[in-house]
Amino acid sequence: MNNSITPTDKRLPLWLTALALCALLAIFWPTFVSIAAIWERSETFAHGYIIFPISAYLIWQRRAELLAVDYRPDWRAALLLLVLGSGWLLAHAGGVQVIEQYAAVAAIPLMVWGMLGWRAVRTILFPLAFLLLAVPFGEFLIPPLMNFTADFVVAALQITGMPVYREGTFFTIPSGQWSVVEGCSGLRYLIASFTLGTLYAYLTYRSAKRRIIFSLLSILVPIIANGLRAYMIVMIAHLSDMKLALGVDHYIYGWVFFGLVMLLLFWIGAFWREDEAPEAEKSAQAEPGRTFERGAFIKAIALMIAVTLPWVLYANFLDARSAAKVEVTVPAPVPAKGWQAQTAPPADWKPHFKNPSAEWLGAYTRDGKTVGVYLAYYHTQRQDAELNNSQNIMIHQKDPVWSNVGESAHPTALGGASVPVTQTLLKSNSQRLLIWEWDRIDGRHMNNVYLGKIRLALAKVLGLRDDGASIVVFTPYEGNPAQTAPVLQGFIADMLPAIEASLEQAANRHGR
């Protein structure tokens, strides 16, 4: 009696693979829970609920081919899983939840590869890759999609002879005012189209070329279609004296239009379908080969877990250390070079930063010019309390008072270096604000979200100082904001050393 299995005895490797996947789910449980939580609260990503069942069904369809494969544990997958785990740790430490989630989901095909070998993974490669669509991804596309939709609608209106006045994503026509908000960006259409498009391409075509082309079309078509949808809604409302396409019918019309566009896309794609043609001949019999040691699969599952678990354990240690409550205060920057502290800021406005360790809002005046200052200081980085967070914004999308009418990069001299600060233009019924915002990390001024995330994540993982601050300066303007920009530049040149000293005091009081 020996300790081996034959190629026809497939149950043990499959059961051990299932056990390895359960262990993976347990190891990354908080990450998978965070994915499901986004499915629950966001209609944009609610499709995630069906991704895993669809993947399981597609694998089941190929069970005959999968059972015919010669299973062989592949130790190369463990090396990739080791790299993936380090990436997950950095993303977790930096609070980059989407990368953390992608790493956890990508570990699934790597685990299958390590347990069953590359031939098994290749057999079910698309169903495994399809799992990546379960990760809520794409919110960073909302601003450019909003701008594209506004560009498209305004251009279409002008082509049809409609006079248009535009500021940012707001535009006015003779019959009324319109704005392209997040819900009009078309992200939901884009995600739904790409998900359906890739699945359709996989089921309908055999060649990789046709699958790639159709998948690319499923990205391009909904972007153009969303621009057409927005233009048609504006025209319907305009021609009906603002009676139609303004309420619930606005959304119903949008989804009906999207459904028709997708049906048209699938109908056109069906002219080149290949699913009715037989696939390349594949052996339905198990590959002839050798017997395998049961111990090889036992060792494989142990190795896969061993290269994954330490990252999560270390992340839990870092989280526990960051969770310690620390009382932090940011002292008011000391006035300098003729600037005088003022009790009230120049506007009834304040940026929205999520869970800073400490924040300070004040104002300074000189020669009749008033500049507001907002400092958001983060003592350490943790999920939902980090310096670089998509929820750290100047105003909410549907702010009742203020509207964002422009955002761009503006090169500014900061401490002897030129930094492209984020310039935002806000307006209300009675006032306009010119706002500059940037970050200070490890004593350096910067405004690169990705570089900032990497620096803070590495610092946290290495046990170094991982605090940071966002600096916001703002002042009222009239007419051309470029004429007011020298006020902010002059204020920064005079007061930046005092602002830096204030932030250093906040850090040094707690041994950072």
Image: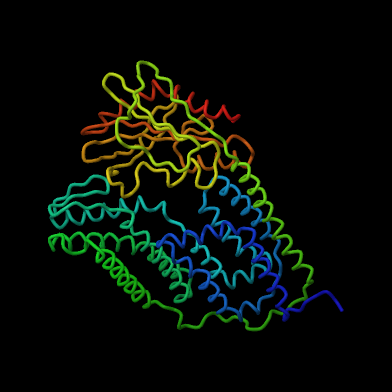
99 horizontally vs 66: left or right: left
Q: Tell me: residue 326, above or below residue 313.
A: above
Q: Camera-side residue: 372 or 3?
A: 372
Who is closer to the viewer here, 451 or 234? 234
Is residue 325 visible in the rendered image? The answer is yes
Name which quarter of the figure residue 247 lies in.
bottom left
The image shows residue 110 at horizontal and vertical percentages of 62, 62
Counting from the top left corner in percent of width and height, residue 396 is at 35, 47
On-image quarter of the N terminus: bottom right
Q: Is residue 489 left or right of residue 138?
A: left
Image location (x, y in percent) of residue 409: 36, 38
In the image, residue 377 above or below residue 175: above
Q: Residue at x 47, y 76 (%)?
A: 203
Pick the residue in front: 184 or 358. 358
Quadrant containing the C terminus is top right
Query: Taking 499 as reference, is 348 above or below it?
Result: below
- Which residue is painted at 25% across and 55% down in the image? 152
Q: Residue furthest top?
A: 338
> Which residue is at a point 50% across and 30% down the rendered structure image?
329
Quadrant assignment, res 119: bottom right
Can residue 405 be seen by looking at this rendering?
no
* Residue 192: x %, y % from top left: 40, 66
